[in-house]
Amino acid sequence: AGAARGSCAVQGRGVLELAAGLGLVGLAARALGARRVFLTDVGVALPWLERNVELNRRRGTCQVLELDFFSPEKSGLSSSSVDLVCCSDCVLWPDLFEPLCSTLDYFMGDQAVALLSVVRRC
């Protein structure tokens, strides 16, 4: 029942996962029926994301993009492609909270929803 309820939140939507790491949240969203998933991160995380997309046979429905919180516009993604923004434990340093908020503002269209989880570290 929980999976069925969760699928309603992503079913047919464009999902953006910020600082995806290995892409667990985005890949789960796709498995629950998201129309399109954008997995984003920077640097060394990108090859791992690509690999996980391949391993989960999601190529074509999941797209890996480089996205830096300091310049989200360089990702080539627009807010019109995004219905749901997910971010799970994506800020390790307090200096990144403001750029994260700017990135959220950049992608949040009129009907978009953001789901965030934050781990408090000291």
Image (spheres, rainbow, N blue to C red):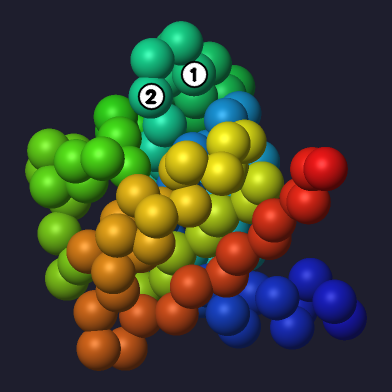
Q: Are marks 2 and 1 in contact (CB under 8 Å)?
A: yes
The quarter of the displayed image where residue 39 is located = top left
Q: Residue at x 49, y 18 (%)?
A: 45
Question: What's the amino acid at mark 1?
Answer: Ala
Q: In the picture, which quadrant includes the C terminus? A: top right
Q: Secondary structure at mark 2?
A: loop
Q: Is residue 104 left or right of residue 3?
A: left
Q: Nearer the viewer, residue 13 or 41?
A: 41
Q: Secondary structure at mark 1?
A: helix
Q: Which residue is mark 1?
A: 45
| Percent x, y of residue 55 | 59, 22
| Percent x, y of residue 73 | 13, 47
The answer to whether any part of residue 75 appears in the image is: yes
Q: Is residue 10 left or right of residue 4?
A: left
Q: Nearer the viewer, residue 86 or 53?
A: 86
Q: Which residue is mark 2?
A: 42
Q: Residue at x 25, y 88 (%)?
A: 110
Q: Nearer the viewer, residue 37 or 65?
A: 65
